Image (cartoon, rainbow, N blue to C red):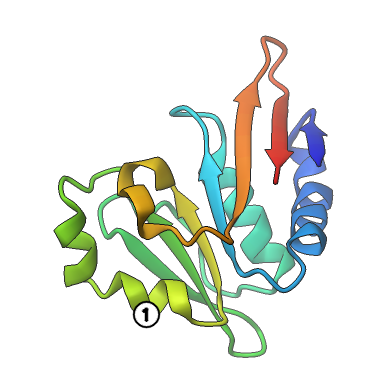
């Protein structure tokens, strides 16, 4: 599936489409260059799913947990600062990736085979006009 986002007003609709596309899959891996909009799209997903916590990039903490209105936990993981895969096991990455909670991952390519093969993949590219193109598989 392909989604084109022309401006910020298109984010909530794009987030709802990603949720619908995901079906019962709860792990979504986001690929894109620095500044492509990974965190912004994840923030919209959290809002659509009912997050009441303030969402921000977990670049320094690696994992942020957000709670929804109904008490469900959402995980936002950022592998950008990971130097070695062993660091991921030290934080208990398996627990985040084997549950039934939503788990949004930035920079999954830096973690190698840690991301489960059944994850939904969102590849983000930008155009010269500021559009974001999301290719979802």
Inspect this view and state whether residue 107 appears: no
Q: Nearer the viewer, residue 104 or 65?
A: 104
Quarter of the rendering occupied by the N terminus: top right
Q: Looking at the picture, how far across and down is residue 22, in whole percent?
A: 73, 62
Q: Looking at the picture, how far across and down is residue 118, in whole percent?
A: 58, 61
Residue at the (75%, 54%) spot, across then down: 18
Q: Is residue 134 left or right of residue 86?
A: right
Q: Residues within 10 Å of mark 1 (few under 14, many from 20)?
A: few
Vertical side of 109 occupied by 51: above or below: below
Residue at the (70%, 71%) spot, across then down: 49
Q: Is residue 41 left or right of residue 15?
A: left
Q: Looking at the picture, how far across and down is residue 7, in whole percent?
A: 76, 31
Vertical side of 97 occupied by 39: above or below: above
Vertical side of 42 occupied by 46: above or below: below
Count of numbered badges drawn on the protein: 1
Residue at the (82%, 62%) spot, across then down: 20
Q: In the image as oriented, which residue stretches furthest toward the top? A: 128
Element under label 1? helix
Q: Looking at the picture, how far across and down is residue 54, in whole percent?
A: 51, 65
Q: Which residue is mark 1?
A: 95
Q: Nearer the viewer, residue 26 or 77?
A: 26
Q: Nearer the viewer, residue 53 or 73?
A: 73
Vertical side of 67 occupied by 37: above or below: above
Q: In the image as oriented, which residue stretches furthest toward the bottom? A: 71
């Amino acid at each position: 599936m392909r989604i084109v986002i022309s401006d910020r007003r298109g984010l909530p609709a794009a987030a709802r489409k990603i949720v619908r596309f995901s079906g019962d899959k709860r792990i979504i891996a986001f690929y894109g260059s620095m500044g492509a909009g990974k965190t912004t799209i994840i923030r919209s997903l959290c809002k659509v799913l009912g997050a009441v916590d303030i969402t921000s990039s977990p670049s320094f903490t690696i994992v942020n947990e957000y709670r929804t209105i109904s008490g469900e936990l959402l995980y936002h993981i950022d592998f950008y600062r990971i130097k070695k895969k062993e660091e991921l096991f030290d934080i208990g990455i398996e627990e985040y990736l084997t549950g039934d909670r939503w788990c949004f991952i930035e920079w999954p390519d830096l973690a190698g085979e840690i991301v489960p093969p059944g994850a939904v993949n969102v590849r983000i590219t930008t155009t010269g006009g500021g559009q974001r193109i999301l290719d979802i598989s």
